[in-house]
Image (cartoon, rainbow, N blue to C red):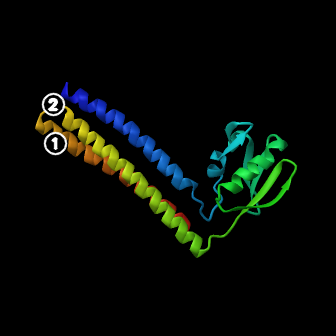
């Protein structure tokens, strides 16, 4: 019975931690770097007739031999919406030209001032994620304290497991932060 309680708490909180990690890693991935990131652009959402659609469902994306991001809309009428979405997300793309169903973007160079601002933003996102992990950690500890069916030794054992679980997710987030900072510095 005791292990069932812990297993249920652990399962629910691990799902919550996974969700949080995905959210914060996604935020980090959306920060621009010195390289065209097709996956980031593909995931951007366009408001099309009141419906939110990812760009990947509205266009194909390629990188040209001139290192341009080429967006080829399936429906030429949607190209202005797609273009506005790319530009409005402030990922450092500049529209070079647009013809029929295609838009060509280049990536503006990162100045040292922009790089420093982006690194601060990366660190802020990471701190926000770590804060959310600490809240989940506290929630688990509170759940264990409230449960009178668990012995003190069991509670302590589960608290140690909780500490390791939270540390594991914090380490994953820190690794994503370090990777993004390296991208920004390269």
Residue placed furthest toward the front: 50
Residue at the spot x=47%, y=50% of the render? 24
The answer to whether 32 is drawn above or below residue 112 in the figure is: above
| Circle 2 residue | 148
Say which element carries label 1: helix
Q: Quadrant of the N terminus?
A: top left
In this image, 112 relative to 161: left or right? right
In this image, 128 relative to 5: left or right? right
- Residue 156 has which mark? 1
Residue at the spot x=72%, y=49% of the render? 61
Residue 177 percent across, percent down from the top left = 46, 59
Quarter where residue 111 is shown = bottom right
Residue placed furthest toward the bottom: 112
Residue placed furthest toward the right: 100
Residue 87 percent across, percent down from the top left = 71, 56
Residue at the spot x=79%, y=43% of the render? 78
How crowded is the residue under tag 2: few (<14 C-alpha within 10 Å), some, or many (20+)? few
Can residue 185 be seen here? no
Q: Quadrant of the C terminus?
A: bottom right
């Amino acid at each position: 019975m005791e292990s069932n309680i812990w297993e249920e708490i652990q399962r629910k909180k691990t799902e919550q931690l996974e969700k949080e990690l995905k959210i914060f890693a996604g935020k980090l991935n959306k920060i621009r770097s010195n390289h065209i990131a097709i996956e980031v652009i593909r995931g951007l959402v366009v408001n099309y007739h009141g419906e939110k659609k990812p760009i990947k469902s509205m266009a194909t994306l390629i990188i040209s031999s001139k290192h341009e991001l080429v967006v080829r809309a399936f429906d030429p009428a949607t190209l202005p919406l797609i273009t506005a979405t790319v530009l409005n997300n402030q990922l450092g793309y500049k529209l070079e030209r647009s013809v029929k169903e295609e838009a060509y973007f280049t990536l503006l160079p990162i100045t040292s001032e922009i790089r420093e601002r982006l690194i601060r933003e990366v660190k802020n996102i990471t701190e926000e994620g770590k804060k959310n992990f600490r809240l989940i950690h506290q929630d688990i500890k509170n759940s264990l304290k409230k449960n009178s069916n668990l012995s003190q030794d069991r509670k302590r054992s589960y608290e140690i497991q909780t500490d390791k679980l939270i540390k594991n997710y914090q380490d994953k987030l820190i690794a994503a932060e370090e990777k993004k900072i390296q991208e920004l510095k390269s």
